[in-house]
Image (tube, rainbow, N blue to C red):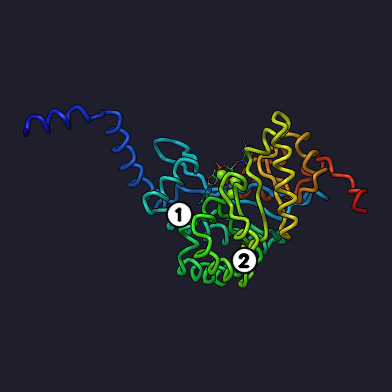
Amino acid sequence: CDAKRARRSFAFYDPEQEAYSRNQLTLMGDLREALAEGHLLVYYQPKVKMVDGVVHEAEALVRWQHPERGFISPGVFIPFAEQTGKLRAITEWVVHDVLTQASAWLNEGLELCISVNVGVSDVEDASFVSFLEMQLAGCQVPPQNLCLEITETGVMRNPKELMRNLEYLRAMGVKLSIDDFGTGYSSFAYLAKMPVHELKIDQSFVMSMNERFENVSIVRSIIELGHILGLSVIAEGVETEAVWQALAVMGCDEAQGYLIAAPMPAKAFSLWCRSDSRLHLPIPLPNMAEG
Ligand code: C2E
Ligand code: MG
Ligand code: MG
Ligand code: MG
């Protein structure tokens, strides 16, 4: 019987799986070190108003410069941090870094609302709400200069429980955005009650708008839905002028994407804001039908 078990476990031994587990374990230790040693850094990507091309917001996107492995994308380490209960530490580090930067920019006369991506596990926790209150006060940043982006999938996982903290944050003055909209399963009943300011159309619909015609209809429906609910609608992943034009005609409020600028380090971002590079974008014509 023992031999049988041994044979069976031998049959299940998968060197690739073991290498993967060992890799994940190392990564977890490295993530702890990254936070302690300052290997994480925040990039900023402008969010632009479509009517006049003005930048009044930016999204903070974390990057990991690993000393041996090089650059690790947040698309890889954020889900990993979430699974291993390490997300909160990252979120707190990002919030502190962003508010310190926002405060410095405010003193230089650059007033921006900065969006931070947060996990639903962060927002579900009441102690995170008090952490935010303390950080905003400590850094002397007005709450309306901070926006939290939560994915649609996260918001709809447990909307009833989440509502209370979101309402508290909204009353504090913090802005709220539903990220990657269109990829989750929204209950319209909850969506109508969500105390959020913004819907962010997922880039998968936006990027391929000109190749896949059905995506134009999806994007148009999301814009209409957002407006019916009194929300501002932003499209992410705007890469071409053709897509910008199409969004402008549909009355999309804001845009974000490589066409405008890729995410960049804080210093480059503030220089970019002071340059006029953004003014070369086509500005939509006023909508005559509504005039
Ligand atoms: P997201 O919040 O939906 O961010 C948009 C992603 O699209 C970013 O990738 C951004 O660099 C990329 N992007 C922006 N414009 C374009 C474009 O025109 N075309 C294309 N193809 N991509 C564009 P990034 O920075 O790799 O982040 C990936 C995801 O990782 C984010 O998706 C977000 O869910 C997560 N993330 C990033 N930073 C943080 C963070 O500080 N905390 C948490 N919890 N999640 C984060
Ligand atoms: Mg986001
Ligand atoms: Mg997104
Ligand atoms: Mg995403």
Residue name at image x 57 percent, y 68 percent: 136
Residue name at image x 54 percent, y 69 percent: 164
Specify which label sits upstream in the sequence, 2 or 1: 1
Instruction: Name which residue type carries label 1.
Output: Ile
Q: Secondary structure at mark 2?
A: loop
User: Residue 260 or 102: which is nearer the viewer?
Assistant: 260
Q: Quadrant of the N terminus?
A: top left
User: Residue 76 or 158: which is nearer the viewer?
Assistant: 158
Instruction: Name which residue type carries label 2.
Output: Val
Mark 2 or mark 1, whichever is nearer to me: 2
Callout 2–callout 1 Cβ contact below 8 Å: no
Could you say which quadrant of the image residue 232 lies in?
Answer: bottom right
- In the image: residue 273, left or right of residue 42: right
Q: CA distance from mark 2 to mark 1?
A: 20 Å
Residue 177 picture location, percent across and down: 62, 56
Q: Secondary structure at mark 1?
A: helix
Q: How many neighbours does mark 2 have within 10 angstroms: few (below 14), some (14-19), or many (20 or more)?
A: many
Residue 76 picture location, percent across and down: 46, 40
Can the viewer see residue 108 in this picture?
Answer: yes
Can the viewer see residue 103 in this picture?
Answer: no
Report which residue position mark 1 lands on: 90
Residue 145 picture location, percent across and down: 65, 63
User: Residue 82 or 111: which is nearer the viewer?
Assistant: 82
User: Residue 10 or 103: which is nearer the viewer?
Assistant: 10
User: Can you say whether 108 is above or below 208 in the image?
Assistant: below
Residue 46 picture location, percent across and down: 68, 48
Q: How many neighbours does mark 1 have within 10 angstroms: few (below 14), some (14-19), or many (20 or more)?
A: many
User: Can you say whether 41 is above or below 127 in the image?
Assistant: above
- In the image: residue 277, left or right of residue 84: right
Whether the residue carrying mark 1 lies under 8 Å from ligand 1 is answered with yes
Report which residue position mark 2 lands on: 174
